[in-house]
Image (tube, rainbow, N blue to C red):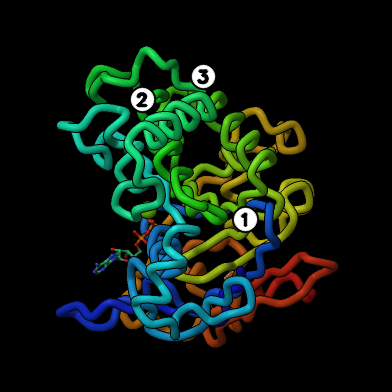
Amino acid sequence: MEAKNLKKYFKTPKGMLHAVDGVNFKLRKGTTLGLVGESGCGKSTTGRVLLRLLEATDGEVIYEGKNILHLNSNEMRALRKEMQIIFQDPYASLNPRMTVSQIIEEPIKLNKLIKNKEERFIKVLELMELVGLSERLINTYPHELDGGRRQRIGIARALSLNTKFIVCDEPVSALDVSIQAQILNLMKELQKKLDLTYIFITHDLSVVNHFSDEIAVMYLGKIIEKAPSEELFSHPIHPYTNALLSAIPKLTIKQDNEQIILKGEIVSPINPKPICRFANRCIYAKKICKEKEPALEKVCENHYVACHLFKE
Ligand SMILES: Nc1ncnc2c1ncn2[C@@H]1O[C@H](COP(=O)(O)OP(=O)(O)O)[C@@H](O)[C@H]1O
Ligand code: SF4
Ligand SMILES: [Mg+2]
């Protein structure tokens, strides 16, 4: 998958809100891109535009060689079986009046993938086993289960079709830390087993540390730094990435460093000025930062940053 200059603007009474403002990335099959940043920076909107749950304002989404933004609804329907989303709060996204088996079975039924009822039942059992849900839960309802099990249902449902690509929108953010690890391990195992490609959205950098192959840090609709996971954690460049990393308590490389507390408000995403969007919170900001928008530029192999500072 590739996003090229992807944009999503929302019309608001105060002007155009630049939720996603020229995002570029490439994602190889079977790998994970972590999309990280504070609430409101445009992560979910990016995920939804990639799946065409929202229509892009501009740009391209290349999936297996085709710009899917130009596909008609029939062509898109076929693709939807491959492209799925997992949400933060499985409880809100699962129908409370349906049993586990009905929830997992629903996409198979709607897409007429398996018409025979018994075969469908067997498929549901297979999916439950795949995601570590005990067979005895098959007739329970979401409210009878804990958050971890509910998220396993969400994952099973996302895998019920011929899934290849999944946008995981904060899939563990609502879970206890101990359960977070279990779900992340499960997702990693499934990725290997089924050769899945993930966009993993989170506001918490520590969650994607060992999970993502690459990480893109977003700030107000833009990717401001992008690098392979290890590189980003060991050699962060952008002041904002450094601030995010310093907030992770147990990170060994940063252990001696103090947490960088960001001061100042995030500027409005409505009609943003063509300057560095982080300038009002950046301790290194200088004249040029408030005159010119920094472009995302290559620092070394696979490492990109949008900051006037790195050139010095
Ligand atoms: N339907 C919408 N209409 C107007 N603004 C929206 C809409 N959806 C999201 N936004 C705005 O777009 C920006 C990005 O939101 P979102 O993608 O949800 O961020 P994140 O997932 O990173 O928290 C926010 O400023 C949000 O208020
Ligand atoms: S461009 Fe300037 S203001 Fe923006 S992050 Fe870099 S140093 Fe800070
Ligand atoms: Mg979100």
Callout 3: SS: helix
Q: Is residue 25 above or below residue 160?
A: below
Which quarter of the image is occupied by the N terminus? bottom right
The residue labelled by disc 1 is: 33
Mark before the other along the chain sequence, 2 or 1: 1
Report the amino acid beneath label 3: Ser
Which numbered disc, 2 or 3, marks the residue closer to the eye?
2
Please state the horizontal and vertical placement of residue 111, each as a whole percent of the image: 34, 55
Mark 1 crowdedness (10 Å alpha carbons): few <14, some 14-19, many ≥20: many
Residue at image x 65%, y 34%? 189
Mark 3 crowdedness (10 Å alpha carbons): few <14, some 14-19, many ≥20: few
Report the amino acid beneath label 2: Gly
Answer with left or right where residue 136 lies relative to residue 21.
Answer: left
Find out whether the residues at labels 1 and 3 contact each other: C-beta distance under 8 Å.
no
Residue 262 or 145: which is nearer the viewer? 145
The alpha-carbon separation of the residues under discs 1 and 3 comes to 23 Å
Callout 1: SS: strand
Mark identifier at residue 178: 3
Mark before the other along the chain sequence, 1 or 3: 1
Please state the horizontal and vertical placement of residue 61, each as a whole percent of the image: 53, 76
Residue 292 or 197: which is nearer the viewer? 197
Establish whether ligand 1 lies closer than 8 Å to the Cβ of label 1. Answer: no
Report the amino acid beneath label 1: Leu
The residue labelled by disc 2 is: 147
Which quarter of the image is occupied by the C terminus? bottom right
Residue at image x 44%, y 36%? 156
Callout 2: SS: helix
